[in-house]
Image (cartoon, rainbow, N blue to C red):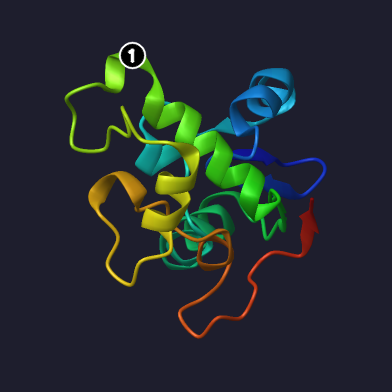
């Protein structure tokens, strides 16, 4: 997540949407950079609403507009597949080693997918618990 105080913007890092690339490109212009551990870098809109937005308002007088990038769902699944096929993932519970892309996709569609096929939802990432979108600007 990147916070730009002068522009009054916060840029969410939705997983598997190119967030590492745009974070590297923009981090020098950001006033606050949340990076490193996935749970910090990839803060959901819900967590932002509960914890970080109140901090920004109280400590810095900021109520930034929220910006996020999402990806075509099939391309996001393809990216997760490649990520979970990498050699250093072999033997881990989330490894998809030995699976075809078709098998991986079918596993992601199960009601209770195996651990390697639990990908999360881009919509849930940018929504509140009722499903309302919590970002002001959403880009493909």
Residue 87: percent from the left, percent from the top?
33, 14
Q: What residue is shown at x 64% (from left), y 56% (from top)? A: 61
24 or 7, nearer to the observer: 24
Horizontal side, residue 35 vs residue 23: left or right: left
12 or 14, nearer to the observer: 14
Q: Can see residue 14? A: no
> From the viewer's perspective, is residue 32 above or below residue 130?
above
> In the rendered picture of this protein, how many numbered marks are placed on residues?
1
Quadrant into which the N terminus falls: top right
> From the viewer's perspective, is residue 104 above or below residue 64?
above
Residue 88: percent from the left, percent from the top?
29, 14
Residue 7 lies in quadrant: top right
Horizontal side, residue 70 vs residue 118: left or right: right
Q: What residue is shown at x 51% (from left), y 67% (from top)? A: 124
Residue at mark 1: 87
Horizontal side, residue 103 vs residue 67: left or right: left
49 or 79, nearer to the observer: 79
Q: Can see residue 93? A: yes
Residue 47 lies in quadrant: bottom left
């Amino acid at each position: 997540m990147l916070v730009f105080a002068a522009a009054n913007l916060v840029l969410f890092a939705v997983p598997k949407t190119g967030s590492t690339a745009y974070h590297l490109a923009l981090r020098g212009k950001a006033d606050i950079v949340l990076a490193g551990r996935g749970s910090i870098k990839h803060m959901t809109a819900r967590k932002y609403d509960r914890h970080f937005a109140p901090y920004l308002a109280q400590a810095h007088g900021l109520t930034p507009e929220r910006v996020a990038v999402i990806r075509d769902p099939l391309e996001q699944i393809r990216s997760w597949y490649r990520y979970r096929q990498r050699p250093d993932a072999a033997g881990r519970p989330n490894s998809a080693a030995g699976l075809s892309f078709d098998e991986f996709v079918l596993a992601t569609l199960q009601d209770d997918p195996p651990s390697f096929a639990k990908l999360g939802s881009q919509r849930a990432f940018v929504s509140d618990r009722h499903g309302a979108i919590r970002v002001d600007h959403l880009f493909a």
